[in-house]
Amino acid sequence: MSSLVPFAWQVPGVFRSRVGERAGRQRIMAAEGHLLIILHKVPRAGVTEREFVLFWRDPKGGWLSTETGSGLGALHAHFDAWRKVIDELEDVMGEPPQAANYFGVLQRTSPLLRTIRNTCRTMQEAREACSDRDLLLARDEAGELERAVDLLHTDAKNGMEFMIARHGEEEARRSAQLVLMGHRLNLLAAIFLPLTALGSVFSMQLSSGLERWNAPWTFWCFVGVALLVGLGLVAAILIEMRCLQQPPQRKGAARPKRGS
């Protein structure tokens, strides 16, 4: 049966028998002083299948890897790839708060968080199986990466929830102001509709003398004043509606700061 373990590696036969054509989950194998560590690479965006990398420590303390490089340098290079992705996501979180940015970081960090947690567990098992100090440092390095990814995921989640809550507050404020505007219009209608209706039905005309004073200029002056009042009322309504469409300026509305 074929195995993913390189043929040139002089590892115990149990390693080859337990590693088939697919790497499977992240884990370690220890036998006869040999240590084999199976880790997953940084998950690529939109790819569900995980790529793997093997690290082998022989009884003399020598290290080999299926990646470029030799010794523990390959393991550190593996963790450097994680740091590069984390730095890119931190740059995205440093941009002005946007729901699209938060959602993108959440989608990206979900598989990253699962993978790096399993990596930390695997490195802890490797540390328990071998007393090599380099493994202790590698385990701590993986723990720092897990914490960084966890902080990114939590920050993005909190930022998204904050934007949803703020959007809900703005919608509630706009709804309340629209109700108030409707109430004002109803009051105007309640006051003037009966008067205009009665005046139209009964053709009411009260003689005050103004209708004959300086005619017809008095009539046109009243018409002009009525038009100005109407235009002023329309302008006030339009200005208030425009204010409703603009989000309020809030102090401290930026995304929450990352925790320690």
Image (spheres, rainbow, N blue to C red):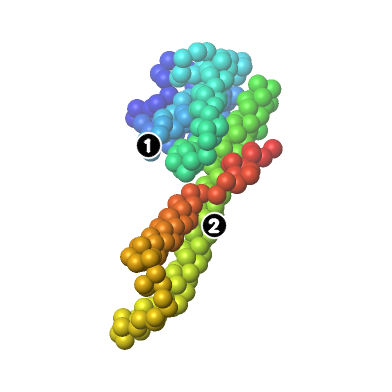
Residue nearer the viewer, 118 or 242: 242
**In this picture, is 43 found above or below 208?**
above
Q: Quadrant of the C terminus?
A: top right
**In this picture, is 116 found above or below 216?**
above
- Label 2: state its secondary structure: helix
In this rendering, would 2 be left or right of 68? left
CA gap, disc 1 and disc 2: 34 Å
Residue type indicated by callout 2: Glu
Residue nearer the viewer, 98 or 235: 235
Residue nearer the viewer, 11 or 178: 178
- Label 1: state its secondary structure: loop
Per the image, the residue denoted by label 1 is 46
* Mark closer to the chain start, 1 or 2: 1
Per the image, the residue denoted by label 2 is 169
Residue type indicated by callout 1: Gly
Percent position of residue 135, x then y: 64, 25
Tell which residue pokes out farthest to the top in this image. Answer: 70
For residue 27, say whether it is visible: no
- The residue at the point 63 percent across, 43 percent down is 252
- The residue at the point 57 percent across, 46 percent down is 249
Given this view, does label 1 or label 2 mark the residue nearer the observer? 2
Residue nearer the viewer, 92 or 20: 92
Q: Quadrant of the N terminus?
A: top left
Percent position of residue 24, x then y: 43, 37
* Badge 1: residue crowd in 10 Å (few <14, some 14–19, many ≥20): few
**In this picture, is 11 found above or below 197?**
above
For residue 144, say whether it is visible: yes
- The residue at the point 52 percent across, 24 percent down is 84
